[in-house]
């Protein structure tokens, strides 16, 4: 993790689940100080959540003022709210001035072209993070538009690497990133839950089954990362001839689990394309 670069003057518009995971992870890592953070919230409860957890951050409902005071603005609202945020006006009819700010959008499917149109310049980055950023194990993809400098890219990498890993991709590849790692935690949570259910069906207490299932997913992922071996090779090593695992693998193949996972990733990627 490169902490030489500290992030200053960050305004985040939308303080929901993903902002809590990503920005919360950045605060935990030390990449960002709460005193450098402004959260623009819509609901009272969201504002209270941030000010009670990070007392030094600023919370506000005034987007125009929060953008004016920022160096970096992160758009963390749902995709269908992005257009409304970009066109925001305050009670005096003043629009937000996005000029001179690095704009970082985490909204699924909202293309760089729409963001550039909305802010009136091309110093714009699209990031697809995921919720394990909260515990420092995030996986993010990002793509940049023409006005983004090398220093900006370094800042984005510092931010994202402080909460996990980051890969720069082309804009069309952002749909695939969404399918694999953006939505991916949900697939893995489902697998952990189902593994635990299987354990309960086989007679284990629920808590024991969940503990074993969680550690198994964590351990398997670590093995792929740390050995650098192909997952198929590691799978073969678990399957003893005539043993228990190959009996289970046969059931997974009969139920097309591999195909279902591929189709799930494609469905998410397609939905990301549709949102654009
Ligand atoms: N949840 C996830 O795992 C991931 C989400 N994303 C993206 O992150 C973005 C946010 O998603 P979530 O955090 O899951 O949604 P969320 O619904 O938890 O958070 C959005 C927040 O924006 C607030 N909001 C709505 N209008 C606003 C406005 N005009 N000004 C300020 N705040 C406003 C809402 O009250 C809410 O607190 C989405 O665009 C999504 O595509 C990206 C990667 C993963
Ligand atoms: O479900 C969604 O649309 C968001 C984007 C990726 C993960 N969650």
Image (cartoon, rainbow, N blue to C red):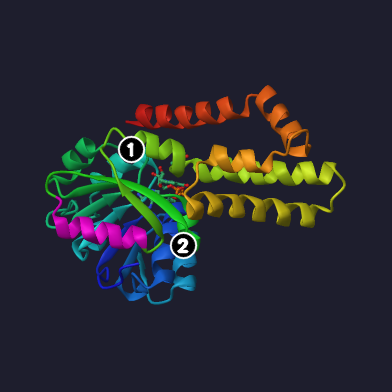
Labels 1 & 2 near each other (Cβ < 8 A): no
Reply above or below: 231 against 131.
above
Is 149 part of what is drawn in magenta? Answer: yes
Quarter of the figure that contains the C terminus: top left
Q: Secondary structure at mark 2?
A: loop
According to the image, label 2 marks what residue?
136
- Foreground of the two, 37 or 221: 221
Residue visible at 56% across and 40% down? 233
Residue visible at 48% across and 41% down? 183
Quarter of the rendered image showing ligand 2: top left
The magenta span reads: 148-161
Query: Total marks drawn?
Result: 2
Image spot of residue 186 (x, y percent):
55, 43
- Foreground of the two, 272 or 257: 257
Task: Name the chief secondary structure element in magenta.
Answer: helix
According to the image, label 1 marks what residue?
174
Residue 109 seen in the figure: no
Residue visible at 33% across and 38% down? 174
């Amino acid at each position: 993790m490169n902490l030489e670069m500290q992030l200053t003057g960050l305004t985040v518009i939308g303080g929901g689940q993903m902002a809590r995971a990503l920005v919360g992870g950045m605060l935990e890592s030390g990449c960002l100080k709460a005193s450098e953070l402004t959260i623009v919230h819509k609901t009272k409860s969201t504002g209270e959540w941030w000010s009670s957890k990070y007392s030094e951050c600023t919370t506000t409902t005034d987007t125009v003022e929060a953008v004016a005071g920022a160096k970096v603005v992160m758009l963390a609202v749902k995709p269908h709210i992005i257009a409304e945020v970009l066109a925001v006006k305050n009670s005096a009819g003043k629009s937000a001035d996005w000029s001179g700010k690095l704009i970082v959008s985490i909204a699924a499917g909202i293309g760089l072209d729409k963001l550039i149109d909305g802010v009136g310049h091309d110093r714009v980055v699209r990031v697809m993070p995921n919720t394990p950023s909260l515990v420092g194990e995030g996986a993010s993809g990002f793509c940049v538009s023409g006005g983004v400098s090398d220093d900006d890219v370094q800042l984005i990498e510092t931010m994202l690497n402080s909460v996990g890993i980051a890969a720069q991709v082309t804009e069309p590849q952002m749909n695939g990133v969404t399918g694999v790692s953006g939505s991916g935690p949900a697939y893995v949570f489902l697998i952990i839950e189902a593994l635990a259910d299987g354990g309960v069906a086989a007679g284990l207490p629920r808590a024991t089954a969940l503990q074993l299932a969680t550690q198994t997913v964590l351990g398997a992922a670590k093995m792929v990362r740390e050995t650098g071996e192909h997952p198929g090779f590691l799978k073969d090593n678990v399957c003893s001839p005539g043993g228990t695992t190959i009996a289970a693998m046969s059931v997974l193949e009969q139920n097309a689990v591999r195909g279902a996972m591929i189709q799930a990733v494609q469905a998410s990627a397609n939905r990301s394309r549709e949102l654009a």
